[in-house]
Image: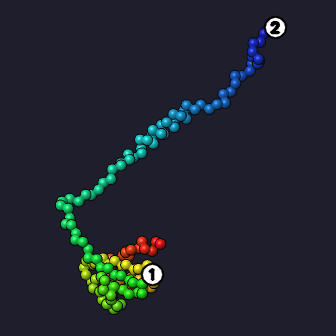
Amino acid sequence: MGMQIGSGSASADPEVMIEMNMTPLIDVMLVLIIMLIITIPIQNHAVNLNMPQGPSPVKQTDPIVVNIDVDFDGTVSWNGAAVNPSELDAKLAEAAAQPDQPEVHLRPVAVVPYKSVAAVMAAAQRLGVTKIGMVGNEQFLK
C-alpha cells in the first residue's frame, strides 16, 4: 500500500493565487507622478514693479482747508463767520470753481438736527464740491 504524504490527494491542483500583483500598478503611478512634477510650471515668487525713473516729484503744497460749522440751532458758519443759505451757496460755488478745490471740513455739533447737516451736504454736492468730509465724528460715538 502506498503512503500518502500530506493532507490532500496527490492529484490536487496547486492553490490559485487570488491576490493581484501590485508592482506594475505602483510603477505606473510613480511614472504618472514624475510626469506631473515635470509638467507643473515653476512658481515665481517675484513681483515685477515698474519703478519711477528720474528725480522725485516736487513736494505738494498743503491744501486749503475751509471749516463749515453747523450749530445746534442750524446756524451755519464758514471759517467762523455766520452765513445764510444763499451766502453758503455762493461760497460753495466759488470753492467748486477753483481748479484745485479746497478741502471742506464739515463739523456739526452733537445735538444738531440731521436736516441741517443734510442741507449743507446736499448744497455742496449740487454745486460740485468734491473734497468734503465730516470732522469730529468721535462725539457721536457716545
Task: Say which element carries label 1.
Answer: loop
| Quadrant in the rendering for residue 49 | bottom left
Q: Which residue is drawn at the image coordinates 32% and 79% (left, top)?
A: 67
At label 2, counting other C-alpha atoms closer than 10 Å, the crowd grade (few under 14, some 14-19, many 20 or more) is: few
Q: On the rendered image, what quadrant is the N terminus found in?
A: top right
Callout 1 amino acid: Val
Horizontal and vertical percent position of residue 127: 33, 85
Can you see residue 123?
no
Residue occupied by mark 2: 1
Counting from the top left corner in percent of width and height, residue 16 is at 68, 27
Looking at the image, which residue is at 54% across and 33% down?
24
Q: Residue 80: where, in percent of width, then height?
A: 31, 83
Which residue occupies the foreground of this view, 4 or 32?
A: 32
Closer to the eye: label 1 or 2: 1
Residue that protrudes farthest toward the top in the picture = 1
First in sequence: mark 1 vs mark 2: 2
Residue in the picture at 55% in, 35% down: 25
- Would you identify the image quadrant in which residue 40 lies? top left
Within-10-Å neighbours for mark 1: few <14, some 14–19, many 20+: few
Q: Is residue 90 above or below residue 136?
A: below
Q: Nearer the viewer, residue 89 or 9?
A: 89
Q: Which three-letter amino acid code belongs to the residue tagged 2?
A: Met
Instruction: Determine which of the numbered discs, if any, sits on residue 111 in the image.
Output: 1
Image position of 101 (left or right of 120): left
Provide the secondary structure element on which disc 2 rests. Answer: loop
x and y percent of residue 2 in the render? 79, 9
